[in-house]
């Protein structure tokens, strides 16, 4: 959403997702929550979501998810060719650039059809899917689903098993230059491959930061009474992106007041991100 110019404060999104809004959410916050839910559903799903039925479920168009299984094959007319590898990708985009998609479903299936090309490595196909989604733009109001689909493909291909590859992180740091919209397919795919490298570097930096913070919070939590819940809070803070007193109390089976006292003990390691006196949220 940030790449499209829609800025949402993280604390507003967190509080809206937890159902503890201090005021009615803005439209951008509600949209961000829909995308957050789509990412959660994609994280739990498999290759069956790389289809029109799966994308429609992620977008909230239908209530029922497709049954688990392999990804349905979808090919764009005119792309059946003996070419393999990059040649097949280039040929596919020649047909795709003609703009023959006449409905959202056809546009989504045309974009996903790039995954059926033979001989191309999964990372190149993920970059091609991201570019095809940008080119066709089958769901203008659900544009970020294209990057989500690319991450889901890498997960289904076994190239990134920790979750969904965060290509959005790189796009926020380095958006696509306007000139590339009219560049050759070689240059556009090279841009997306560079984005994968940038996203990986940024995630490694975040993992290093979390590792240092994990060591700090474990040191603060060590010692104390026999029934000290500090080590439990340390593990919870590492496993959970954000924490509230209610979430801590529920996870550790303690009172909200006790959870607040635990958080105060971790001062300097847990940072409050909302700047409010009520409905506060902490993170490492």
Image: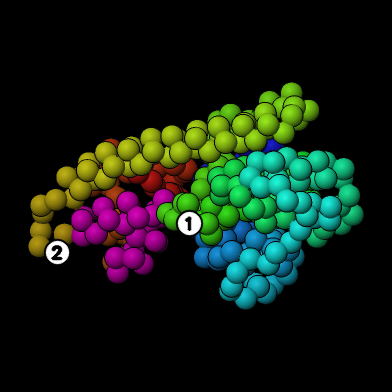
Residue in the picture at 69% in, 72% down: 63
The image position of residue 33, as x and y in percent, is 61, 54
* The C terminus: image quadrant: top left
267 left or right, relative to 1:
left
Residue furthest top as drawn? 179
Confirm whether residue 193 shows in the render: yes
Which residue appears at 29% of the width and 50% of the height? 263
Horizontal and vertical percent for residue 68? 58, 74
Whether residue 235 is in magenta: the answer is yes
Which residue is more in the foreground, 152 or 114? Answer: 114
Which coloring applies here? rainbow
Question: 10 Å neighbourhood of mark 2: few (<14), some, or many (≥20)?
Answer: few
Identify the residue position indicated by label 1 in the image. Answer: 158
In this rendering, the answer to whether 230 lies above or below 199 is below
Give the magenta part as a residue range.
Answer: 229-253
The quadrant where residue 106 appears: bottom right
Q: Does 62 appear in magenta?
A: no
Residue hosting label 2: 227
Q: How many residues crowd mark 1 within 10 Å: few (<14), some (14–19), many (20+)?
A: few
In the drawing, does residue 205 fall left or right of residue 84?
left
Q: SS class of the residue under badge 1?
A: loop
In the rendered view, would you say 45 is above or below 148?
Answer: below
Quadrant of res 175? top right
Q: Position of residue 254 (x, y in %)?
A: 28, 66
**Above-or-below relation of 90 to 23:** above
**For the residues carrying marks 2 and 1, which lies nearer the camera in this image?**
1
Using the rendered image of the protein, determine whether residue 142 is visible from the camera's viewpoint: no
Dot 2: element:
loop
Left or right position of 176 against 14:
right
- Decide which of 220, 119 is in the foreground and name it: 119
């Amino acid at each position: 959403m940030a790449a499209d110019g829609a800025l949402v404060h993280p604390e507003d999104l967190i509080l809206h997702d937890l159902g503890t809004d201090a005021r009615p959410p803005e439209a951008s916050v509600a949209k961000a929550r829909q995308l957050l839910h789509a990412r959660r559903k994609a994280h739990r799903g498999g290759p069956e979501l790389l289809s029109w039925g799966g994308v429609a479920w992620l977008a909230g168009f239908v209530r029922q998810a497709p049954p688990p299984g392999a990804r349905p094959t979808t090919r764009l007319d005119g792309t059946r060719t003996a070419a393999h590898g990059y040649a097949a990708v280039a040929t596919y985009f020649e047909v795709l650039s003609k703009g023959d998609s006449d409905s959202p479903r056809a546009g989504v299936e045309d974009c996903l059809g790039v995954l059926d090309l033979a001989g191309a490595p999964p990372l190149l196909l993920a970059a091609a899917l991201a570019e095809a989604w940008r080119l066709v733009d089958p769901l203008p109001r659900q544009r970020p689903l294209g990057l989500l689909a690319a991450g889901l493909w890498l997960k289904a291909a076994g190239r990134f098993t920790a979750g969904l590859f965060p290509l959005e992180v790189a796009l926020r740091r380095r958006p696509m230059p306007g000139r590339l919209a009219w560049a050759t397919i070689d240059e556009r795919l090279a841009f997306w491959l560079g984005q994968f490298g940038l996203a990986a570097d940024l995630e490694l930096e975040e993992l290093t930061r979390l590792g240092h913070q994990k060591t700090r919070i474990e040191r603060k939590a060590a010692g104390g009474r026999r029934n000290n819940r500090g080590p439990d809070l340390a593990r919870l803070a590492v496993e959970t992106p954000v924490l509230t007193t209610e979430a801590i109390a529920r996870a550790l089976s303690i009172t909200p007041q006790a959870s607040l006292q635990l958080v105060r003990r971790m001062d300097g390691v847990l940072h409050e991100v909302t700047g409010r006196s009520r409905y506060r949220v902490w993170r490492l």
